[in-house]
Image: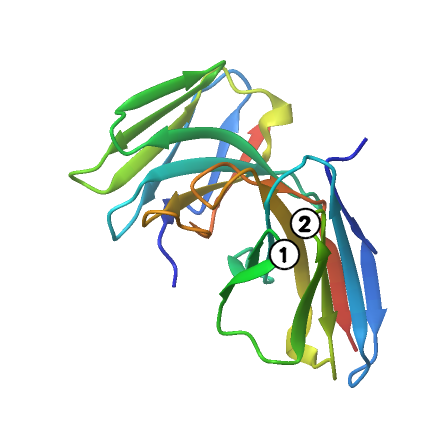
């Protein structure tokens, strides 16, 4: 069953602007992960935030997690044309879980 | 060296045929997966193997049969292909279970005519 829902479905910005994508989920989680998928390629892991963490940074990426609202956001600062891709959130639930449940993704277009 | 490699990248075949997709990972991971991505980019898990043992078998037609000869390989065999099987199939692996990050292959685009 689908767990994460990204919002917006599509986002178009100018190079240099910040991009914010949101993810909402339904059940309690162990962690939440963000992945990037370039057109015609596999998914690449960006960042993992555990349920007891509220914010995490990695380079130009900033992820927040609000477990009370069951939501997360991914902020990409100073976007570049190379950031053009689809971004997916994925949730891991249950001890010893062997699956991630993915949302439908946000398609980000960064215009040079 | 590619961490998770799957072959072929493209597979075009007729309805009713049987085909296989191969996957290999050189990361020393214990867990491997097959995911299916539909035309709307929705990614859904199909199977999960841990140390060659089937852990997850989602609601997938039994025409799909995974085979794990060793923990570095997880192949997917599909019998009697149907039009609705057209999708991109991704192999992935992780160190432990799904609570850790996944490493994905580049995908196999299957087109059933």
Badge 2 sits on which subunit? B
**Residue B9 x %, y %:** 81, 53
Most extreme residue toward the left, as rendered? A68
Q: Quadrant of the C terminus of chain A?
A: top right
Q: Is residue B46 visible?
A: no
> For mark 1, what is the residue?
B52
Other-residue count near label 2 (Cα within 10 Å), few / some / many at <14 / 14–19 / ≥20: many
Residue ID at (46%, 46%)? B98
Question: Would residue B71 be found to the left or right of residue B6 on screen?
Answer: left
Q: Can you say whether A38 is above or below B79 in the image? A: above
**Residue B104 x %, y %:** 64, 43
**Residue B105 x %, y %:** 70, 45
Secondary structure at badge 1 equals loop
> For mark 2, what is the residue?
B71
Q: Can you say whether B12 is above or below B53 in the image? A: below
Q: Is residue A34 visible?
A: yes
Tell me whether the residue at label 1 lies in contact with that at label 2, contact meaning CB atoms closer than 8 angstroms: yes
Secondary structure at badge 2 equals loop
Residue ID at (59%, 20%)? A80
Q: Quadrant of the N terminus of chain A?
A: bottom left
Q: Can you say whether B86 is above or below B30 in the image? A: below
Question: Would residue B91 be found to the left or right of residue B97 on screen?
Answer: right
Q: Are marks 1 and 2 on the same chain?
A: yes
Other-residue count near label 1 (Cα within 10 Å), few / some / many at <14 / 14–19 / ≥20: some
Q: Earlier in the sequence, mark 1 or mark 2?
A: 1
Badge 1 sits on which subunit? B
Question: Would residue B23 be found to the left or right of residue A18 on screen?
Answer: right
**Residue A38 x %, y %:** 65, 38
């Amino acid at each position: 069953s689908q767990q994460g829902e990204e919002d917006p479905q599509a986002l178009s910005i100018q190079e240099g602007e910040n991009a914010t994508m949101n993810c909402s989920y339904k059940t309690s989680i162990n962690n939440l992960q963000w992945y990037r998928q370039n057109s015609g390629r596999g998914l690449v892991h960006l960042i993992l935030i555990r349920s007891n963490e509220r914010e995490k940074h990695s380079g130009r990426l900033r992820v927040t997690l609000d477990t009370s609202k069951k939501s997360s956001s991914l902020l990409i600062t100073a976007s570049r044309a190379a950031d053009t891709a689809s971004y997916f959130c994925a949730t891991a639930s249950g001890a010893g879980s062997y699956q991630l449940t993915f949302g439908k993704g946000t398609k980000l277009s960064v215009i040079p | 060296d590619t961490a998770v490699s799957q072959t072929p990248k493209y597979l075009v075949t007729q309805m009713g045929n049987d085909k296989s997709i191969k996957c290999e990972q050189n990361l020393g991971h214990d867990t491997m997966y097959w995911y299916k991505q539909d035309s709307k980019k929705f990614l859904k898990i199909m199977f999960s193997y841990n140390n060659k043992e089937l852990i997850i078998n989602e609601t997938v037609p039994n025409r799909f049969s995974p085979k794990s000869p060793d923990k570095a390989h997880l192949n997917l065999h599909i019998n009697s292909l149907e039009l609705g099987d057209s999708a991109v199939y991704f192999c992935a692996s992780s160190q432990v279970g799904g609570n850790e990050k996944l490493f994905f292959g580049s995908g196999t685009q299957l087109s059933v005519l």
